[in-house]
Image: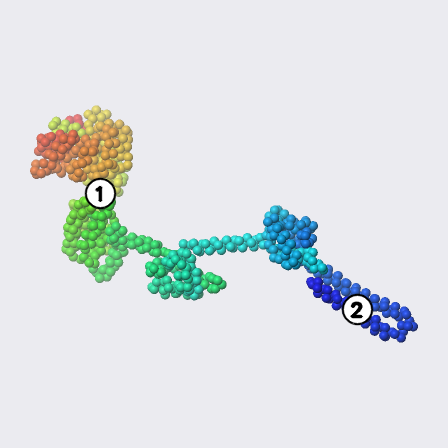
Amino acid sequence: MWRNWEAAQKIAWRFVLLYIVISISWLLISDWLLQDHLQNAKWISTVKGGLFIVLSALLYYKLIQRMIKDTIENEANYRLIVENVSDLIVVADRDGYIKYASPSHERLLGHRSEEYEGKELFDFIQTEDTFKMQDWFQNEIMLKKEIEVEYYLKSKEGNQVLVEGKVVPVASGNGKVEKMVLLAHDITKRKQFEKQLIESEERYRKLVEYSPETIFIHIDGKIVYVNNAGLRLAGVQYIEEVVGKNILDFVSSEDLNYVENQIRKVEETGKTKLHDYQINRMDGTRLFVEALAFQTTYQENKAVQVIIRDITERKRAEEKVRYLAYYDSLTGLPNRNLLFDYLNELLIAIKKEKQTLAVMFLDLDRFKMINDTLGHSYGDFLLQQVASRLKACLPKGSMLARYGGDEYIIVLQEKKLEAISRLSDQIIDKLAEPFFLSDRQMFISPSIGISIYPKNGDVAEELIKNADAAMYLAKEKGKNTYQFYTSSLNSMDSCKLELENGLRNAIKNEEFTLYYQPQVDLNTNKIIGLEALIRWKHPKYGFVSPAEFIPIAEETGLIVAIGKWVLETACNQHKQWEEKGFSPMRIAVNVSALQFRHKDFAKTIEQIISNTKCRASYLELEITESVMQHLGETTTIMNELKELGVNLSIDDFGTGYSSLNYLRHFPINTLKIDKSFVDEINNGKNGEIIVKVIIDLGNRLGFQVIAEGIENKQQAIFLKQNNCHIGQGDFFSQPLPAEKMERLFSE
């Protein structure tokens, strides 16, 4: 009854009617019972009325007491709820003035309840929502309708708090709305969360839609969703062409069972590991893909989401990497990795059957000169042509590999040395045929080293190493030939290694010395110059021939440091002789091609001249024709040297670079006729003609011409008669150390 006014009215009317009935009944019954006494005793009527009044008063007392008690209890309960509830409760009159505000306002907005009372409700509502609330109050509330509301309240600190609730109109007895109750709760965080959720869903949607990875969802194998990347992967334009199809329709036949197993695994475990397989696009092309699947829900149904990445290019790259790991990209031949794998496996197989095989190590002679002169494109084409010719020569069952650079290895399952020799001759003859590279005709020859299993080794590394050693022996014997490995080559290699190690410490240990060979005026027989020649006294082997250690020094790069030592020593010696009063004369020093092309060579010469105080005009640098291959670079360096005042000489003229074009461009002072031509004087008509041509050429170009290696009087006379003015050789004097050279000066 306390909750419903209409129910309370009905209960009140029932109570009044009951009271009337009881009262009338009391009067009638009491009068009937006391009718005989009422006339004689009026006091009885008074007592009867008083008793009724007392009983009615007691009844009213109990009723009022119960009502007050219930009211107090209900009010206490409601107050307890209202004052402790987190929601906002406001009671306002129909004009919007606040009669009551719950304490929760202070916790949420910072205003105490007393600060609200008597003030207009709209003062605490954000301006943008004020008109909306006023409109609701004027229309909906007055029609006694409860309305759902959402609006911003202003906190004491000036912040906005978004609340959601409803407005309940309260009508008076006459049915008019006299006040209203606003119930609201803070939804700021919820709205923020909803906004974040919407934004997150939007980001996820865009991420899925525009992801470069294919994302699709299937239910029991039937595709129900696919993103744009999936359409591109499938090779279609419209989603309808994919949705509704079974995912297995796109899987290649060879991977079908594997994918079915993966689908079952998702059903059992909820996800699968990353796996790859092949799929067929709608146009029939095949792609390699990488997939990850896991359980999800789609439109409240259990589903599987699959993320797919196209790895076709990666697979192709991996295949290319695998190919390049075992095959040479230029020639298509197996490379050294595949060679070692193949040879090791073959050795295991033939070891059981006690068979034999040959390893042939082939190196192209003069390839570097062709590559450096004509360029790498010509060199690459030549290597391809050589590979084709070699393959044409080989019998079935053999293997040809490119070992690196211009080196090839042939593995031949052959036990007869005669057959191996015939194949080697055939290869030499085949490569002797001219190669046509664009508009050029080229010739090349091979040097071949051969090792035999098991005689020369029983593992791949040893067989290849020994074949390599035999190949170098073939080069030393004139190239364009082949050599079988012999055990003596090991001792040669060991000696070579020991010499190389010794060279690295020879300067520090002062093992080098310089000898000087006179250059003589053929007309007067007077010494007019010297050539400085290096000598090495090895602590174990004694004097080592320059012909042995100079190639090692060039191969290891030590020639640069050794050459600098020679220049410094020769210049210092020249200065000492000058200080001792000997007539100054030109001193010639050999310079290797590697040293000549070394960075800042001209600056090194300038520094040596400055440090030793040797005059540049007395220093002559002898350069071999091999440096002439790089015309532009060589010209620049020579001009720098000429600016220093240094003389330049071409050593061993006629034995190296075949073109005479450089004679027109280089600032050369001297030509030296090689000993090999001088040796032919008086021994053959052609040799004498060549010497005459060189002398005549040098004289006509204004060069000094020096003949080296003169060993007898007849050679000296011939050279003098043909206008060669300077000679050098054992006929005049062997190379001498500085002390003996001084005695020769004094004679």
Q: CA distance from mark 1 to mark 2?
A: 136 Å
Q: Is residue 342 above or below residue 714?
A: below
Mark 1 or mark 2, which has the lower sequence index?
2
Q: Which residue is mark 1?
A: 374
Q: Quadrant of residue 611?
A: top left
Within 10 angstroms of label 1, few (less than 14), some, or many (20 or more) residues? few
Pick the front one: 543 or 173: 173
**On the rendered image, what quadrant is the N terminus found in?**
bottom right
- Judge whether residue 536 can be spotted in this image: no
**Farthest residue in the top direction?**
581
**On the rendered image, what quadrant is the C terminus found in?**
top left
Q: Is residue 431 left or right of residue 338?
A: left
- Judge whether residue 130 can be spotted in this image: yes
Q: Is residue 667 above or below residue 457?
A: above
Q: Is residue 549 above or below residue 384?
A: above
Within 10 angstroms of label 2, few (less than 14), some, or many (20 or more) residues? few
Label 1 or label 2, whichever lies nearer to me, is 2
Tag on residue 614? none
Pick the front one: 520 or 669: 669
